[in-house]
Amino acid sequence: MSKIQTTEYKAFIKKIKIKAQQAQIKASVRVNSILLEFYWELGGEIVEKQKSANWGSAFLENMSQDLMHEFPNMKGFSKRNLELIRKWYLYYSEKNEITKQAVSQLLLIPCIGILLCKGKDKTLVEYALSDIHKPMGVSEYELTHILPKELESSLPSIEEIEEELNCMKDKIN
């Protein structure tokens, strides 16, 4: 079998490689979202069973051993992890109604919002998001340092983002 070495073929393979990497990232985000939902529900079920069933103090130890036996290749079912899942559930479910809504939204919407700024300026961000009634954090992060070179060209430049935002702004006005 002869190896294809044309520029067109190499560009085609590079394009497929980038698409495959992007699909892997999207799949990882989706899997993490599903696992987060699973652990939230597991925490709720543990709390409920500890209230309603008379299984005693060995409940989490037994549960841990049984789940690790059933799922030997899956991590996260140690007694300590089950205790932490339970605490996580209790902390966020009993905190207050706003937290319950935020956690449910986190479970249902596996996405993040990004506000691009030239620098880390909390006042500017708060002003830009003043009509949004959700918790927020401000961070400055440069993804380009860890982003594979092949993917850098698939991202829009700052100028392209600014141009797109200006077009959207013009359409609104």
Image (tube, helix red, strand yellow):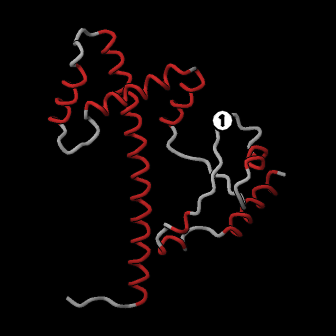
Left or right, 93 with reference to 59: right
Near-viewer residue (2 or 81): 81
Residue closest to the far left = 69
**Label 1 residue SS:** loop
Q: Which residue shows up at 70% across the image and 55% down it?
A: 120
Quadrant of image for the N terminus = bottom left
Q: How many numbered tags mark residues here?
A: 1
Tell me if residue 54 comes above or below residue 78 in the rendering.
above
- Mark 1 surroundings: few (<14), some (14-19) or many (≥20) residues within 10 A: few
Give the image quarter of residue 24.
bottom left
Residue 33 on image: x %, y %: 43, 42
Tell me if residue 41 comes above or below residue 109 in the rendering.
above
Q: Which residue shows up at 80% across the image and 51% down it?
A: 172
Left or right, 73 with reference to 124: left
Give the image quarter of residue 69.
top left
Left or right, 122 with reference to 22: right
Q: Which residue shows up at 40% across the image and 30% down it?
A: 40
Residue 14 on image: x %, y %: 42, 77
Q: Which residue shows up at 48% across the image and 24% down it?
A: 91
Residue 165 on image: x %, y %: 73, 59
Of the residues shown, which amino acid type is indicated by label 1? Lys
Residue 157 on image: x %, y %: 65, 70
Residue at the spot of label 1 = 134
